[in-house]
Amino acid sequence: MKRIALVGNPNVGKSTIFNVLTGMHQHTGNWPGKTVAQMIGFFSFQEEEYELVDLPGTYSLISHSEEESVTRDFLCLKEYDGVIVVCDSLCLERNLNLVMQILDITPHVLVCVNLLDEARKKKVQIDLKELERLLKVPVVGTEARKKKGISNLEKRLPEMMQKKEGFQTHYPDKIEEKVKKVEKQLEKVSDKIPSRFFALRLLEEDSFFQKEIENHFQINLSNISVEKLTEKDTLMQVEMKEAENIAKKVITLENESFQEKEKKIDLLLTNKKTGIPIMLLLTMFIFWLTITGANYPSELLFNFFAGLETPILEGLSYLSCPSWLSSLLVGGIYKTLTWVISVMLPPMAIFFPLFTLLEDLGVLPRIAFNLDRCFQKCKACGKQALCMMMGFGCNAAGVVGIRIIDSKRERMIAILTNAFVPCNGRFPTMILLISMFFVGTSKFSSIWEVLILTGIILFGILMTFWISWLLSKTLLKGVPSSFTLELPPYRKPQIIKVIIRSVFDKTLHILGRAVIVTIPAGILIWILANIKVGNLSILAHFNQFLDSFGKLIGLDGVILTAFLLGFPANEIVLPIILMSYLNLGTITDYTSISELQRLLVDHGWTILTALNVILFSLLHFPCSTTCLTIKKETGSWKWMILAILLPTICGILVCFTTNLIFKLFTRLV
């Protein structure tokens, strides 16, 4: 079986080519020693079996980020038979930098120029034959989404593997002399080292990469004599100039101003004055669609699951199941589980496709660009903006997203502050309380809900900035790393693929993890609510114990207990509150908003209580799924505990402050 590596810049259609070639014959895992996911697929062509390794997208092999270093390490240190480099037909010059770096490692390269249909629409012609002549390796053109050109790619794989030499960047004579000297020394050390690429990295004094080489090959490079480059000898400038020259020779523009329309849109979306307001309006629109669109399916799910309770209880009775076990299975596990599904699934099923749609359109990188200035002032990385946006859907997904950040220090800042934006599980409680205590049932109630919710979220983002700055000045001191961000071309999204990808890769995946932790939570809640010590249940004792502290910060013991028991899933906080107030042994549902509001008011709730519950929902420990993800990503219990304590302490301080200000204000008035 032949092993082929699939490489390319982000947003060039690499995953589409991978899926077309392998179909469903693929599996995922983690790279050894890394948290970065790997994808391996299998396909056959003309009686030859191929293993296709989809490497993380990268702009350059000269990078220290975790994902990009995986690609570099694989190409430099692993065994394979060839490399397919996928390029974007509209960004060929930039993509050629990566092609030339890979050709310094191996001549067994096939260049796949993808998205030719988009180039044709914008009247951009690419001479593939001339490009092949210049690069000295096979070049094929594809339209992967339409599966065009894929058969030609497969036909040329044997030719790729038989190549003995390919294009190599020619540096000025003085640099070439230095490169050859280092190459000869490396060849003596090991014949398995791609000597030219390694020689160039040593000339650049890449100490990080040098350690990787020494650890892998178990050699000592300190004896290698390297003549340092002068300030004038910049390898990158030569490589970029070479890529530019090749691109000029193979690209013909019938319409020189084909990018003018995109530039005009970018002037609006990335402008200092208009970028952030447009971003806010877009965010509000997404929230409005999510809020209004999730209500009806949530109600249907509630009614559906409620209708199954009686048949399930009758079935358990028919099986002579003890009453306590029936209560545990239905009142504990079933009700907790179905509440989480009913509350969590509809908004996620709306939010994630919308989020993925923005990603496919090319809007998300523009949002990151707008927020980069703010994060830079906080001594953090602008890529944190993308992780923060992912946190709106699920904080666990946001934590996983930190892999795109190069610096470990900045990754830790992103992890510790990710919980300051509300995830999908916290939205229902916040929206419901806003509706009951701040909006009512007016004609424009949904608009007011979105405005107030946006204000709360902006407060969470400001807290993210402030805590990021505080961490960068104390626990995680350092200078912000450089941030290179691609603004990809605007593309027409593939709606069906967006829905499938967001539903299966995100919605159902996250829902599945929530279900796993909710089942034991349902058992625990039932035990606490049904086992009595004296005349009170264990749950009631907890409520009484926490009541004094709860009132100090504008809440009460019941609310604090609900948040603690809601650790497995934020969705069950409100039903636990209702269960405690009604002194019931199982999680309960409300029949109407007005009835729920009356119940809360009867138990001492005011506008201040509702505000503090909203603020504490925004600022408190992340759910168990997110905490486990933090532990997995950092490999440390210490960082996970800090990620729990940091937002919780902030939430307590904010609620205490609002409670104190309100009481002082009422006394003065």
Image (spheres, rainbow, N blue to C red):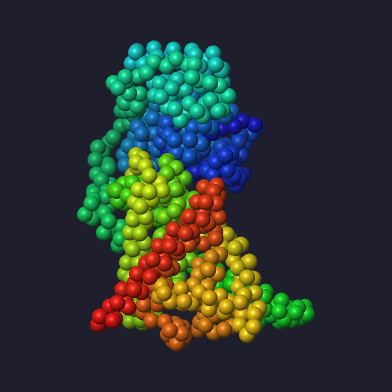
Q: Is residue 513 visible?
A: yes
Furthest residue in direction left, as rendered: 273
Image point (41%, 24%), residue name? 205
Relative placement, left or right, of 436 versus 52 is: left
Furthest residue in direction right, as rendered: 320
From this view, report whether residue 489 is shown above or below residue 588: above
x and y percentages locating residue 626 in the rendered image: 51, 57
Q: Which of the pair 47/643 is nearer the observer? A: 643
Q: Image quadrant for the C terminus?
A: bottom left
x and y percentages locating residue 377 in the rendered image: 29, 48
Relative placement, left or right, of 377 versus 391 is: left
From this view, report whether residue 504 is shown above or below residue 287: above
x and y percentages locating residue 104 in the rendered image: 45, 23
Q: Which of the pair 159/96 is nearer the observer? A: 96
Image point (51%, 60%), residue name? 507
Q: Which of the pair 73/542 is nearer the observer? A: 542
From this view, report whether residue 619 is shown above or below residue 526: above
Relative placement, left or right, of 386 versus 571 is: left
x and y percentages locating residue 447 in the rendered image: 32, 73
Q: Image quadrant for the N terminus?
A: top right
Image point (53%, 65%), residue name? 567
Image point (66%, 78%), residue name? 531
